[in-house]
Image: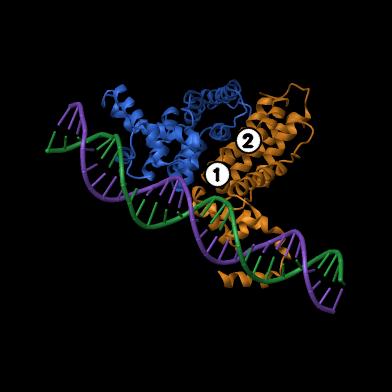
Chain colours: A blue, B orange, C purple, D green
Amino acid sequence: MHEITSEKRTASRGKGERKNARQRILDAALAVAHDVGPAHLSLDAVAERAGISKGGLLYHFPTKQALLQAIVESHLAAIETAAGISAEAPPQDGNAIAIGLLRSYCTASPRKAGGAQGFLAAIAETPSLLDPIRAHNVRIVDCLRKAPEADLALISFLVVEGMRSLELFDSNPLSRGECESILMRLKDRLEANGLERAAGTIPS
Amino acid sequence: MHEITSEKRTASRGKGERKNARQRILDAALAVAHDVGPAHLSLDAVAERAGISKGGLLYHFPTKQALLQAIVESHLAAIETAAGISAEAPPQDGNAIAIGLLRSYCTASPRKAGGAQGFLAAIAETPSLLDPIRAHNVRIVDCLRKAPEADLALISFLVVEGMRSLELFDSNPLSRGECESILMRLKDRLEANGLERAAGTIPS
DNA sequence: ATTAGTGTACCGTCCGGACGGTACTGTCAA
DNA sequence: TTGACAGTACCGTCCGGACGGTACACTAAT
């Protein structure tokens, strides 16, 4: 371990890019979770993976809870920004949000490998970490319900959620092309709705 | 604990209803997972909850792996039978399967509380337990792809998957009524497709 | 009918090991 | 000097699971 550490030190010149130590630790945690399984995520392993000592790790995240919480928060933040939802924006148009969701799935999908496992680790250890996500979902569907053609908007939401879930468990049998095609189709219909609001020409 | 045991013994007369000991343990495991969180599912807790000793538990499930595997298998079996998919049936009609999926979600939904948490516990500890589920998904979408209006069938699959995922994390903001309405709408369109196969009258 | 034997279902204890977390002492660049 | 770590040593807890024992039912030979 000593040798590895010294390599790291000499290679990365003190703390030049050390500002993102937090992020490095987070990434390491995701990687470890992916490698050993969410239930076996240990601080020791994370520290080693991040190239720091356990003491250093605990300097940034004083407890495991803190680390897990940070994982969930970054996870959620990634989703929200990708969908173009500012944290506490004024209640937006349902149609726009649905479209944002559909686009976000493709956009944000070059997922850092194993991010899902880290998320699972957090949830498994502290189910209450789901609270922000629950709130997030409530916020979104509240908007979606108010959209013209609420059903279609909700279906879009559920489809994205389904894809995300499949990817979370690394068991998505659909190709990227198939996913995009489905997403596009839904998006097109939502956009059509957005344009011809008052016209009753849209088939249900 | 001794006293409890004697009660149980006298109350249940030897091994009369003891046949379902396995099932009782499984249920206990789900309940414990729900109470303490997936990551803290311990054999001790399961044994206590099931009203047997740890030794007795290990008699039925020689290892924790075995218990977790049983949880996943029963989970999957419940889904498959609810959707009307016999384990290794001849490749069925895509439309029929999609409709089965849509119906199954409502049918099988009086979920034994916390079944989800048990599932998560299993996945978190041993990600490879996902393999049968992966296979299951592949089988299903293979059928779905061959359906007329494959897109619609796949969307139905994804919607169900989305709902399941939301419920898995106990964060479904949709009411039961809303879910059923969405499911119904999709089902109706699938059934319409089934009837008018060759007619091009169905709007995309 | 008694005895002995076999199998099942379970009890209770024990142990090695891992893990989270604490505490404290360097170190070293800014 | 101080912030940002490194490194080490350790404690208490908890967990999986191996093990040996027990209580009972059933069968089969005597």
Residues A136 and D1: in front is D1
Q: Position of residue A165 (x, y in %)?
A: 55, 35
Q: Which residue does the numbered mark 1 point to in the structure image?
A: B120
Residues D17 and B171: in front is D17
Residue that appears at 70% across and 27% down: B142
Residues A144 and A11: in front is A11
Q: Is residue D26 left or right of residue A59?
A: right
Q: Are marks 1 and 2 on the same chain?
A: yes
Residue at mark 1 to residue at mark 2: CA–CA distance:
14 Å
Q: Disc 1 marks which amino acid? A: Leu
What is the chain letter for disc 2? B
Task: Decide if residue B2 is in sight here.
Answer: yes
What is the chain letter for disc 1? B
Q: Disc 2 marks which amino acid? A: Asp
* Quadrant in the picture for residue B193: top right
| Mark in front: 1 vs 2 | 2
Label 1 sits on a secondary structure element that is helix
Residue that appears at 72% across and 38% down: B100
- Mark 2 or mark 1, which is nearer the start of the sequence? 1
Residues B35 and B97: in front is B35
Looking at the image, residue B12 lies above or below residue B187:
below
Task: Decide if residue B174 is in sight here.
Answer: no
The C terminus of chain B: image quadrant: top right
* Quadrant in the picture for residue A54: top left
- Per the rendering, the mark at residue B68 is none
Residue that appears at 72% across and 29% down: B143
> Are there few (<14), some (14-19), or many (20+) residues within 10 Å of tag 2?
few
Q: Position of residue B47 (x, y in %)?
A: 58, 59
Q: Which residue does the numbered mark 2 point to in the structure image?
A: B131
The N terminus of chain B: image quadrant: bottom right
Label 2 sits on a secondary structure element that is helix
Q: Position of residue A60 (x, y in %)?
A: 31, 38
